[in-house]
Amino acid sequence: MGLRTPLYDTHVSLGAKIVDFGGWDLPLSFGSQLEEHHAVRRDAGMFDVSHMCVIDLTGARGREFLRMLLANDVGKLKIPGQALYSCMLLPSGGVIDDLIVYFMTESWFRMVVNAGTRNKDLAWIREHADAFGIAVSERTDLAMLAVQGPRAIAKTLPLLSASHRARALEIARFSGAALDSWFVARTGYTGEDGFEIMLPAQEAPHTWRALLAQGVTAAGLGARDTLRLEAGMNLYGNDMDESRHPLESGLTWTVAFDPDTRDFLGREALERARRIGGEVLVGLILEERGVLRSHQRVSADGASSPLGEVTSGTFSPTLNRAIALARVPAGTGPRVLVDIRGKPHAARVVKPPFVRNGRILVQVES
Amino acid sequence: MSNIPGDLQYTRSHEWVRDLPGGLVEVGITDHAQAALGDLVFVEVPQVDTLVRAGDGCAVVESVKAASDVYSPVAGRIVASNGELAERPELLNHDPYGAGWLMRLQRDPSAPGDALLSAAEYAQFLDAAE
């Protein structure tokens, strides 16, 4: 038996297919993964993401601490509730994890990190927090739901009291707000608008059922993966890890080199990598039938030696084509060959994301 | 509970076999297999005239989450494959024993008998696996 979220029994009673995900028993799907995917793109779907790790950092020097710890700069966060996506790096530049940090008050920042990296993340954060007098507390008392899709917000609002509803409507994109015991943020991992809600664990089952009653489709890890890949969002462990730095993982935009006086962990290594250049993460669209999968080898047209490999691949339900992220030398393209079961298949190099807010952003037909 | 028609034979790798007149057989994947794989999005069927032995990988079915080989339950020559599946792989989910058939083979009469399971034996095999 794996670790279980407060919604495990609810999922089982709804007929979910449960799989092991990094030690957690989580729903893969509740029926059709494709229908769950389309529900999020076209209407509203919800995911149990309670396995993710919520960490509260408290102490007067929180901002100073995070400006040292993270590759992105929390100095950009001016208004309480604002969120920032960042990598946390080793001195080598390798990615320990990617995360979201919310600025709550000057003495309280909230971080959400991946489930599979929880222990090493906490150890790393604690190791550096002491010197700044920061208290690190893991919020295992909270469950987390992601309600995503063009109708997600409208379908969540009826669950809130009138005063909370008014405040929820004012939440800007990529910001959150504490509404008593709930924390509601307009963030997610699907490329759609919506809310991520952190709430007391015991409130999760009836909230899930109330959202179902509002017509929100229950969705599992399968749809979560196809949605995030269409949205061009990385998966830790697939698209980057401790052996890869953000610049070769499509995450250059998340590294704040300015101001150059900010000395964050990993900065020196990234400065060096930036001068040298090297590999990049690109998007691929398969031009033939088939499905792209991680670790398939990518080569240039006509060349036999591989340039790189697919880091995440899947069938895109929105494009009705296989898509992937692949790590290749900078300047590769516009076409490559991908080895699928020993046969070369033509793919086109594109710039992710593939889909955002229900719209296809890449050219599907060549 | 998955559907296991009584008039077909089965393999432990979740293919079904339907006897047709003239030493022909039709092959597909079982209802249990399609449910376990989830939404199928790509099917690679074998080329006609390919010779296969029992147990040879001869088709690939891919769902959103994974690719899976389909093994020939019998020895013989491929005489037809279901081209409709290229456009409509979801037929495997919706009608695994009918419109979702994968291929037809002419059995090799000289090959040793194939160790296929009856419907009851396959049902028992699934129960034991769970």
Image (cartoon, helix red, strand yellow):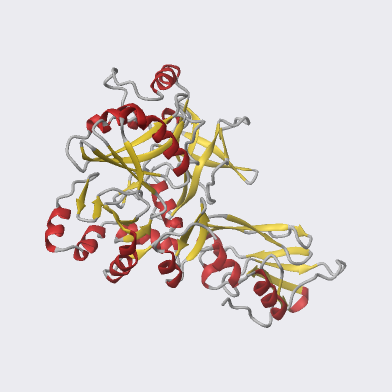
At horizontal 45% and vertical 34% (from top left) the residue drawn is A96
Q: Quadrant of residue A214?
A: bottom left
A156, B40: nearer the viewer: A156
Position of A261 with respect to B33 (left or right) is left
The total number of labels drawn is: 0
Q: How far from the left and from the top, in percent, is residue A172?
A: 18, 46
At horizontal 25% and vertical 50% (from top left) the residue drawn is A185
Q: Quadrant of residue A8?
A: bottom left
Q: How far from the left and from the top, in percent, is residue A193?
A: 26, 51
When the figure is inspected, residue A333 is found, relative to residue A147, above or below; the finding is above
When the figure is inspected, residue A149 is found, relative to residue B118, above or below; the finding is above
At horizontal 23% and vertical 63% (from top left) the residue drawn is A155
Q: How far from the left and from the top, in percent, is residue A116?
A: 48, 46
Position of A89 with respect to A183 (left or right) is right
Q: Quadrant of the N terminus of chain B?
A: bottom right
When the figure is inspected, residue A38 is found, relative to residue A57, above or below; the finding is below
At horizontal 39% and vertical 62% (from top left) the residue drawn is A6
Q: How far from the left and from the top, in percent, is residue A50?
A: 38, 55
Residue A349 appearing in the image: no
Position of A366 with respect to B61 (left or right) is left
Residue A14 appearing in the image: yes
Q: Quadrant of the C terminus of chain B?
A: bottom right
Position of A314 with respect to A38 (left or right) is right
